[in-house]
Structure formats: C-alpha cells, structure tokens
C-alpha cells in the first residue's frame, strides 16, 4: 500500500475534524501543517504529533515530500491557494464551496485537468454511504416518482460579530457556506441541473446574505426548495417527497447519519450510518484512491457538478444582489 503524505493549509476547526479522521487512515499520513500564525501551527502540530510546520503556504506547496494538500481556509482564500498548489504540482482536496464564483472554479478545473492532478471538492456528504442509500431507494422506486425536495439549513450566528460568516471580507453569509449543501445534494440526488431558479434574500447592513430562500425547477419537472440562514436555528433537515411516500433526513442532514423511509404516513424503515470516525474519512480515502489512480476528480463529486453548483450560486447571487470585494472575486 502506497502511503500518501498530507499537508494542511489552515489549521482551524474544520481542519481538526479532518485531521481526526486522517489519523485513523491506514494509507494517509499527516505530514505537515501550514499557517500564517506560528502559534496556531505549533498547537495544531503538537495535538496531532506532526513534526513539520510552515509559516509560509508556499513552503508547504514546494515541499517535495507532500503528496496531497487539504485546504481548509475561509473560502475567500480558496481560489488563489488552490491555484498555487496546482501550479506547484500538488493534488488538492479543497473545502466547500470551492471558490467565490464559477469563473474561478472553471480556471482551477482546467488547470488541474491540464496537469493531470486531483482537484477535489470536499463536499463530504456526497461521499457518504447514507446518500448512496437514498439514491438506491429512489432508483428502486420506493417512494414512486420523486416530485420535490425540501430542506433548510441554518444557525444563529447573529450575536457572534467576529464569526467569519458575518464578515463580508471573508465572503460571509448563508448561501455559499450553508446553502451549498442543499444545492449540491439536490443535484446529486436528482442527477440533473436546474433550468429555472428563483431566489430572494435579506441582506445585512454589511451586504452579506443573512437569510436566503431558493426555488429550483429541474428539466424533468421536479422541484427543490431550500432556505439557509445565519440568523435562525433551522430544522436542518431534508425531505424527498414522492407519490408513494417520502425519504427524510433528520437534523444535520448533511452529516449523513440516518435516513428514514416513510410509506403511507408511517415510518417503514430507518437506515443508520454511524461514522467510523466523524464522516470525513470517506472523502479522505476516496481522494487518495483517485489521486493514485490518476483521476482528476471522483465520480461522487465530479468537476461538472462542482462547476454547476457554483453557476447556480452565481445566479442566486445575481438575483439577490449579493456581491463581494473585488480582491476576492477576481481571477
């Protein structure tokens, strides 16, 4: 078995979950950490027994021992960092959302494909067995024809002024960070891209979207409707409704720990999917498999799907008037 050495850029909370899962991998090894904060890098390295830290991202990118890099910075920084990693010849697993806009994502996809490098969006839900089970139920016709999907996702960050989701300079707001789950999983479960989109939102005084609602119509007639919020504690559930019943993913649907099949108004089956670690393990193992196989992305989260998600969010942003500073929108 070929060992793959991982580097992490941005040792924050999400990177800690990633590292917890990576530590349990038989093939992956956490090799180095890069952060502009010496203290954060040192503390993170100590916690995970990592000998090597860098205070310049470029030093990690240029380390010949690093096989693959996980980028866990705020998404306002994703495009430039991912571009630099690919130019340095590194495989990358990039946290969602990939970038700020579709133009940035398209450039990264083309660069990765030209270099034959893995460029994988870390939309972790897509790699989980829970959503494979949901697709299986749909394919088997358990709920008959699927007519619509409803979901909401949100948490009350309003009193946390320093939280990144309240910061327009970090591309804060509900859509890019939270609504992306509803969009991506709708595309995954329907195997289609919407042909009509309607959106409305409430923007804060600083210009970020605090609450956004979106309706998506798909070519085969299905609908997907979702709300996302950084001001309200939502149900955080997803329901797929068909002519014979429904499939319900309870609170924190994107974590993929349970799927319920309801028929004739009664709970028919509950499928539980406890994670071996924390749910990050699936995308970690799949990313390594793809990189070693010479694939530029996984079939669970292919480039065309990542680009489609960004194009949808571009359209939503256009409709609700959500813009960010030129320095994070540029290509």
Image (cartoon, rainbow, N blue to C red):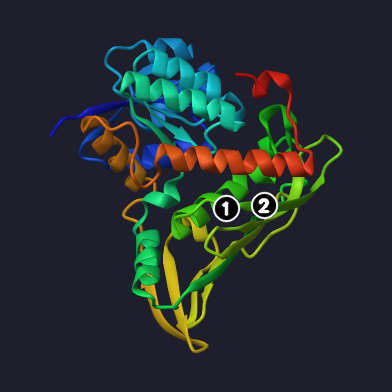
**Along the line of sight, the residue nearer the viewer: 178 or 17:** 178
Identify the element where label 2 is drawn.
strand
Against 191, residue 99 (above or below) is above
For residue 289, side relative to residue 274 (left or right):
left
Q: Is residue 164 visible?
A: yes
Q: Quadrant of residue 76?
A: top right
Identify the element where label 1 is drawn.
loop
Against 232, residue 35 (above or below) is above
Neighbor class of circle 2 (other Cα within 10 Å; few <14, some 14-19, many 20+) is some
Instruction: Give the residue displayed 72% in from the left and 20% down from the top.
Output: 326
Instruction: Give the residue displayed 28% in from the left and 33% down from the top.
Output: 295
Q: Which mark is residue 329?
A: none
Residue 259 x, y percent position in the rendering: 43, 69
Residue 319 x, y percent position in the rendering: 76, 44
For residue 81, side relative to residue 322 (left or right):
left
Residue 227 x, y percent position in the rendering: 68, 57
Residue that lies at the very extreme toward the left in this rendered image: 1
Neighbor class of circle 1 (other Cα within 10 Å; few <14, some 14-19, many 20+) is many
For residue 202, side relative to residue 7 (left or right):
right
Which quadrant, please, contains the C terminus? Answer: top right
The answer to whether mark 1 and mark 2 are in CB contact below 8 A is yes
- Residue tagged 1: 194
Against 83, residue 231 (above or below) is below
Instruction: Give the residue displayed 47% in from the left and 74% down from the top.
Output: 145
Residue that lies at the very extreme toward the right in this rendered image: 205
Q: CA distance from mark 1 to mark 2?
A: 7 Å
Q: Number of marks in the image?
A: 2
Q: Which mark is residue 197?
A: 2
């Amino acid at each position: 078995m070929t060992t793959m050495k991982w580097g992490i850029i941005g040792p924050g909370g999400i990177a800690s979950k990633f590292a917890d899962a990576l530590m349990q991998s038989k093939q992956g090894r956490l090799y180095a950490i890069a952060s502009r904060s010496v203290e954060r890098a040192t503390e993170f390295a100590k916690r995970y027994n990592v000998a090597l830290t860098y205070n310049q991202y470029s030093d990690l990118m240029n380390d010949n021992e690093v096989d693959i890099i996980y980028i866990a910075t705020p998404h306002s920084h994703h495009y430039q960092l991912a571009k630099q990693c690919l130019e340095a010849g590194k495989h990358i697993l990039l946290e969602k959302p990939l970038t700020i806009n579709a133009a940035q994502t398209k450039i990264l996809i083309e660069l990765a494909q030209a270099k034959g490098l893995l460029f994988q969006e870390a939309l972790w839900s897509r790699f989980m067995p829970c959503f494979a089970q949901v697709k299986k139920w749909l394919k088997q016709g358990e709920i008959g024809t699927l007519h619509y999907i409803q979901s909401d996702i949100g948490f009350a960050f309003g009193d946390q002024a320093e939280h990144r989701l309240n910061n327009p300079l970090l591309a804060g707001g509900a859509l890019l960070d939270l609504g992306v789950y509803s969009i991506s999983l709708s595309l995954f479960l329907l195997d289609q891209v919407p042909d009509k989109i309607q959106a409305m939102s409430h923007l804060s005084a600083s210009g970020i979207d605090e609450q956004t609602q979106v309706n998506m119509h798909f070519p085969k007639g299905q609908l997907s409707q979702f709300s996302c919020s950084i001001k309200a504690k939502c149900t955080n559930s997803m329901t797929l409704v068909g002519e014979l019943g429904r499939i319900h993913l309870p609170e924190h649907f994107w974590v993929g720990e349970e799927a319920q099949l309801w028929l004739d108004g009664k709970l028919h089956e509950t499928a539980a999917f406890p994670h071996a670690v924390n749910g990050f393990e699936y995308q970690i193992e799949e990313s390594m498999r793809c990189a070693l196989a010479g694939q530029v992305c996984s079939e669970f989260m292919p480039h065309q799907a990542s680009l489609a998600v960004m194009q949808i969010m571009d359209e939503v942003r256009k409709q609700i008037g959500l813009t960010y500073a030129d320095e994070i929108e540029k290509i």
